[in-house]
Amino acid sequence: RHDDEKIRTIIIAQTASSFEREREIVIESGCDDFLRKPYKELEIFELMQKHLGICFIYEDMETEYTVYPVKGRKNEITQESFSGLSEKVLKQLKTAATVAIMEEVKELIETIRLTHPKLANCFTEMANDFEYGKIAQIIEEYTD
C-alpha cells in the first residue's frame, strides 16, 4: 500500500481457499476485499464497481444467443455447434474446465473432435490460452 493520502491503492486478494477464516485473515492483513477461485468475469467488474465507483453500461443483445468469436479462427460457437453432442461428455468437460484439470480437458476435447471438429478446434484454442473458465461458461450457457 502507498500511504499518501491522495493515492490509495485498492488491494483485492485472490485465492483458491474456500474457508471463511481465510477471508478474515486477508481482510485483517489490510486487503480491501477477497475473491475466490474459480471466479467469473462479472465478479471482477462488481468488485471494481464497489471499490472504485466505476459504473458499467451494458449493451442489450438483440440476438437470442451469444456468439463467441474465437480469435485467430473464423469458427464461431452457436447453439447449433452443440447439436447431437453427448451431454455426459459436455458435463465432464465443464467440470474438468471449472477446476482446470488440463489433461482431462484435452482428452475430452479430442473425444468431441470425433463428431464436432469445429467445436473441438475452438475449445482447443481456448485451452491452449488457458481459458478454461470460458470453456465452462460457454458449455453452461448452451446446455442449461
Image: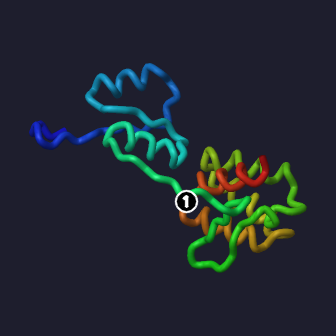
Image coordinates of residue 104 in percent, x first then y, are: 70, 53
Residue furthest out toward the right: 84
Secondary element under disc 1, as helix, strand or loop, is loop
131 to the left or right of 52: right
Which residue is rendered at x = 10% and y = 37% of the image? 5
* Residue sitting nearer the eye, 74 or 45: 45
Q: Colour mode? A: rainbow
Above or below 17: residue 99: below
70 to the left or right of 80: left
Which residue is rendered at x = 62% and y = 44% of the image? 99
17 to the left or right of 109: left
Image coordinates of residue 66 in percent, x first then y, are: 67, 61
On-image quarter of the N terminus: top left
Which residue is rendered at x = 64% and y = 65% of the image? 68
Q: Which residue is mark 1?
A: 130
* Residue sitting nearer the eye, 46 or 72: 46
Amino acid type for the residue under numbered disc 1: Phe
Which residue is rendered at x = 63% and y = 78% of the image? 73
Image coordinates of residue 103 in percent, x first then y, are: 66, 56
Q: Residues within 10 Å of mark 1 (few under 14, many from 20)?
A: some
Image coordinates of residue 8 in percent, x first then y, are: 19, 40
Above or below 19: residue 144: below
Q: Quadrant of residue 2?
A: top left
